[in-house]
Image: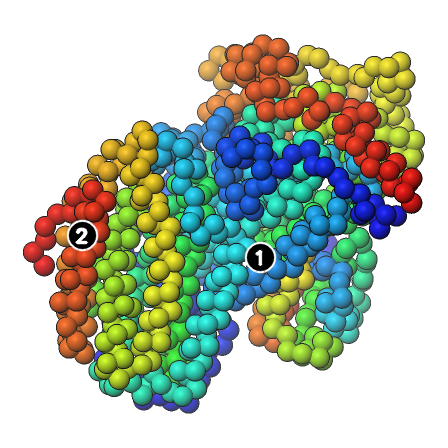
């Protein structure tokens, strides 16, 4: 062929240039069957007729990606460096604040990393070049999030308990099997289910409920590293939300037969994600010395208004309805955080964070945020816990709780319409009984019992002798916990250090 | 209050995370170490993958190439995400500057006609080779074992799509701003006999399910392709009055030198493993036995096409480069089959 | 039943010196915009559609601004990026 004489430059539009630099790089294999090069996109029953219909509004190419991401990281690491240099931890609202961040590092860093690995699965194994490239960018972003989160919290690790062995804890500790099993569930699913599970349900439907409270909480409580890391990560998140929304619309538009499959995944992953967020609810309402908004307000704003009011009418066009059991989540907004925190409070002796009875101001705030439920149902629990404290003790539940076979949270949630009776559901599979915490988790179990019977349930594993030994100290040692990591915050090593630093400062001041 | 507080000297409780202190002692760890070592989950997985229930989601058995301690390998460049994007931002900016310069002086269009044809018919189709290389490398991102290897694969995969985009941009400039030559280059990739060896190789690698042997096979091809297209032809272009080609080639050369650093280190680590070095050697020998002849022949075809355009002795150069690569592999104790090419 | 034209869409931006011009430009180009300040975040919502014009941002910044730069400031959004071009970004629902 001949090279055309150079004509006056006709600049390609952003869209054409993007297409030439991404989609057009693709070719269909002819030396091997396409199905052998891309073997994982048929077994889930999703039908795709035309991969070129995938639209990516961001149209980022590698040069632009590197340029903007480098700029974001320059800003972020400058903040981390100056925070460490200036002993910024002393300016936190209170030492107890960091318990939220311990839970965040232990619970989330490993999941950002799992998202990184499995978006690479999509970047390799989806047939279409458009979604592959978007997934590749997201895979890189998720590695960024795991690493920047570790780096943002690294300074706290040097001065506080509970941060020091997050990866081992993530693989072993009872409450961290909640996020771990959630992500394990997603990455062991097929590529399309993963797109709905993480790309759509987690990144679009629920991400604001997870991240915005953490970041606003950080901003409000003087945690500059987390705030900066979080906002910086969120700026990538808008691309991820777009990928998720694009993914669901693409699947729904490609074939009508995809609609019921997608609906079931949406039903499953809404409830899976919502149960995971119970930990966030507890964090928002109980861990932050200065509170930004309650779980209930956050749920109303980010889920009920934006998603049920905004997104789902849009998806109704395709025949998608709001997720199954959503009415249960709405009903629980008054009680979720209290029940989740009460579980964490009772088992803090076996955790790598500390809790304490909310003080008078906090209880006043809880009363005003939850006037119908807190004074009647939960304040009495804390009054009793306070009495134990006043007597020189601390109420810990020294038994081993029963865990839900699906979400793996101890069975502490209540019956629909009756916040005083613990909800228990069960199913029989191959002659064995499995217990679930809710109708949502039971529905999920019954849909895929062969999957959920495999769950590595921490309490069962302790009973089976797989966790370092039969006693609590044996298990905690196997978890990688140190004696100062858990318990009540008041009188803890962190509390003592915090008080000492500020006493010195007061003297000097 | 903040200001007074800052005058305090506060002794840290510890200098780094427990896993790193156990490996290296309680000394301050680098950001590379904290963000990369021991990050991937290793135990107590909950469910078998629906797409492949015989293994866990992270499993050393996804490759015949293994390490007793996956973190015995570390990236000699110590790249984590932030320095990676900063480095690539600079490299991309440098490339853009070169390309802007070539465009503003119409230097690509002023190359001798034969060199313009070479770019259109041989160089531009290699953007698809780079795109294929991205897919093959991405297998490692998902299936390798351990975050130090994973991070290298991640950055390399993204680099490959970046290289593909750089070559595509050369095509857009040479077409005077349109995508015309890119369309023709794609046809060449699909049909031109000189390129079919490389295309077949990549497509076959896409059906393998061993990220390690895929990576190594691709690397064999890269050594010969880069040796020919960006090292040998860089020099030949200058002699042939095609300085613009040289300017482009240098950027890809710079990238490949960076790429070599981690791949060479990984191969050395596989071969030095205290327990599985012999098994790794056997796996690498198996790759060479199966693929070396195919790779040499594919690049020999490519070199013949280069000579058909510009007659610079590319076939001989490719042959001696293959011999040099073979000698390097032999020096590692590997067995490189004789080839007749 | 709400319609595509009045269901709210919105965008959350980092509250900083650098995003002030962006917020000003969005305020100027979108009637009925609701602005809510939260710790570290400014939240802009509006029924139906929200538009960001490159020219308006550049005018207030006093320098060139690529629409890609929104990615340095955005924290979250709801709605759909119906358009993301060189000169304009549009957030709206599709249906």
Q: Quadrant of the C terminus of chain A?
A: top right
Quadrant of res C54: bottom right
| Disc 2 target residue | B327
Q: Position of residue A458 (x, y in %)?
A: 57, 20
Looking at the picture, the colour scheme in use is rainbow
Q: Quadrant of the N terminus of chain A?
A: bottom left
Residue toward you, B325 or A202: B325
Q: Is residue A390 visible?
A: yes
Q: Residue at x 34, y 55 (%)?
A: B260
Q: Residues within 10 Å of mark 1 (few under 14, many from 20)?
A: many
Q: Position of residue A307 (x, y in %)?
A: 68, 49
Q: Position of residue A164 (x, y in %)?
A: 62, 33
Tell whether A24 sits left or right of B125. Answer: right
Tell whether A349 sits left or right of B49. Answer: right
Q: Position of residue A139 (x, y in %)?
A: 49, 50
Tell whether A50 sits left or right of B243. Answer: right
Question: Marks 2 and 1: same chain?
Answer: no
Residue toward you, A406 or A500: A500
Mark 2 or 1: the one toward you: 2
In the figure, A311 relative to A463: above or below? Answer: below
Q: Residue at x 15, y 77 (%)?
A: B311
Q: Residue at x 79, y 16 (%)?
A: A395
Mark 1 — on which chain does it sit? A
Mark 2 — on which chain does it sit? B
Q: Residue at x 21, y 47 (%)?
A: B331
Which label is found at residue A239?
1
């Amino acid at each position: 062929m001949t090279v055309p004489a150079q004509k006056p430059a006709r600049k390609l539009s952003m869209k054409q240039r993007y297409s030439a630099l991404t989609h057009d790089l693709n070719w269909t294999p002819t030396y091997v069957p396409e199905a052998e090069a891309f073997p994982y996109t048929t077994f889930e029953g999703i039908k795709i007729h035309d991969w070129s219909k995938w639209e990516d509004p961001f149209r980022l190419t590698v040069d632009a990606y590197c340029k903007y991401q480098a700029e974001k990281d320059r800003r972020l690491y400058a903040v981390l460096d100056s925070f460490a240099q200036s002993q910024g931890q002393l300016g936190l609202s209170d030492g107890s604040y960091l318990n939220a961040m311990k839970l965040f590092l232990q619970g989330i860093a490993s999941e950002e990393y799992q998202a990184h690995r499995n978006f690479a699965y999509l970047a390799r194994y989806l047939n279409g070049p458009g979604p592959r490239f978007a997934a590749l960018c997201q895979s890189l972003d998720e590695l960024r999030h795991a690493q920047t989160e570790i780096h943002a919290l690294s300074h706290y690790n040097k001065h506080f308990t509970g941060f020091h062995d997050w990866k081992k804890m993530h693989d072993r500790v009872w409450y961290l099997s909640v996020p771990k099993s959630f992500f394990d569930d997603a990455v062991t699913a097929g590529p399309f289910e993963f797109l709905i599970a993480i790309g759509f349900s987690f990144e679009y439907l629920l991400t604001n409920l997870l991240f915005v409270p953490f970041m606003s909480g950080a901003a409000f409580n003087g945690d500059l590293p987390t705030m900066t890391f979080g906002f910086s990560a969120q700026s990538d998140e808008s691309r991820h939300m777009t990928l998720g929304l694009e993914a669901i619309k693409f699947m729904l538009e490609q074939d009508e037969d995809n609609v019921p499959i997608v609906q079931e995944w949406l039903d499953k992953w809404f409830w899976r994600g919502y149960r995971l967020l119970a930990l966030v609810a507890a964090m928002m309402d109980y861990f932050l010395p200065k509170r930004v908004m309650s779980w209930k307000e956050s749920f109303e704003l980010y889920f009920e208004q934006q998603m049920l009011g905004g997104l789902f009418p849009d998806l109704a066009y395709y025949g998608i309805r709001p997720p199954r059991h959503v009415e249960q989540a709405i009903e629980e907004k008054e009680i979720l955080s209290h029940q989740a925190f009460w579980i964490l409070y009772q088992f803090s002796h076996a955790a790598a964070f500390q809790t304490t009875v909310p003080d008078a101001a906090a209880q006043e705030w809880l009363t005003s945020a939850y006037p119908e439920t807190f004074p009647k149902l939960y304040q009495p629990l804390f009054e009793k816990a306070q009495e134990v404290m006043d007597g020189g003790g601390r109420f810990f539940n020294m038994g081993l709780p029963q865990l839900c076979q699906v979400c793996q949270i101890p069975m502490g949630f209540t019956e629909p319409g009756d916040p005083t009776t613990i909800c228990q559901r069960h199913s029989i599979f191959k002659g064995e009984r499995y217990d679930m915490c809710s109708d949502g988790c039971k529905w999920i179990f019954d849909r895929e019992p062969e999957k959920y019977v495999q769950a590595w349930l921490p309490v069962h594993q302790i009973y089976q002798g797989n966790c370092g030994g039969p006693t609590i100290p044996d298990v905690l040692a196997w978890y990688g916990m140190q004696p100062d990591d858990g318990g009540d915050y008041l009188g803890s090593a962190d509390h003592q250090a915090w008080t000492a630093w500020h006493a010195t400062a007061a003297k000097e001041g | 209050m903040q200001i007074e507080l800052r005058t305090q000297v506060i002794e840290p409780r510890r200098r780094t995370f427990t896993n790193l202190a156990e490996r290296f002692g309680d000394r301050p760890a680098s950001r590379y170490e904290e963000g990369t070592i021991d990050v991937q989950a290793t135990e107590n997985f909950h469910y078998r993958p629906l797409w492949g229930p015989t293994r866990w989601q992270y499993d050393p058995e996804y490759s015949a190439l293994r390490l007793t301690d996956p973190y015995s390998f570390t990236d000699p460049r110590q790249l984590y995400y932030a320095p990676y994007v900063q480095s690539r931002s600079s490299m991309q900016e440098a490339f853009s500057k070169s390309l802007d310069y070539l465009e503003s002086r119409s230097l690509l269009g002023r190359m001798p006609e034969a060199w313009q044809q070479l770019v259109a018919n041989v160089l531009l189709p290699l953007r698809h080779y780079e795109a294929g290389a991205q897919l093959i490398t991405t297998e490692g991102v998902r299936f390798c074992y351990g975050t130090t290897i994973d991070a290298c694969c991640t950055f390399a995969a993204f680099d490959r799509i970046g290289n593909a985009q750089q070559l595509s941009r050369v095509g857009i400039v040479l077409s005077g701003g349109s995508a015309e030559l890119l369309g023709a280059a794609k046809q060449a990739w699909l049909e031109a006999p000189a390129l079919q060896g490389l295309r077949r190789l990549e497509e076959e690698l896409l059906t393998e399910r061993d990220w390690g042997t895929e990576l190594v096979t691709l690397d064999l091809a890269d050594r010969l392709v880069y040796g020919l297209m960006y090292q040998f032809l860089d020099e030949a272009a200058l002699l042939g009055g095609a300085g613009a080609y040289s300017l482009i080639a240098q950027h890809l050369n710079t990238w490949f030198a960076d790429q070599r650093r981690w791949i060479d280190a990984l191969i050395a680590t596989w071969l030095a493993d205290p327990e599985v070095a012999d098994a790794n050697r056997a796996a690498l020998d198996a790759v060479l036995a199966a693929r070396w002849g195919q790779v040499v022949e594919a690049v020999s075809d490519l070199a013949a096409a280069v000579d058909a355009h510009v007659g610079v002795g590319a076939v001989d150069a490719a042959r001696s480069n293959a011999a040099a690569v073979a000698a390097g592999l032999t020096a590692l104790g590997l067995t490189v089959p004789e080839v007749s090419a | 039943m709400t319609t595509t034209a009045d269901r709210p869409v919105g965008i959350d931006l980092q509250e900083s010196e650098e995003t002030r011009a962006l917020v000003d430009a969005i305020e100027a180009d979108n009637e009925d915009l609701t602005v809510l300040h939260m710790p570290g975040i400014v939240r802009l919502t509006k029924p139906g559609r929200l538009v960001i014009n490159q020219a308006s941002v550049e005018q207030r910044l006093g320098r060139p601004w690529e629409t890609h730069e929104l990615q340095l400031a955005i924290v979250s959004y709801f709605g759909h990026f119906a358009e993301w071009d060189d000169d304009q970004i549009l957030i709206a629902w599709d249906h």
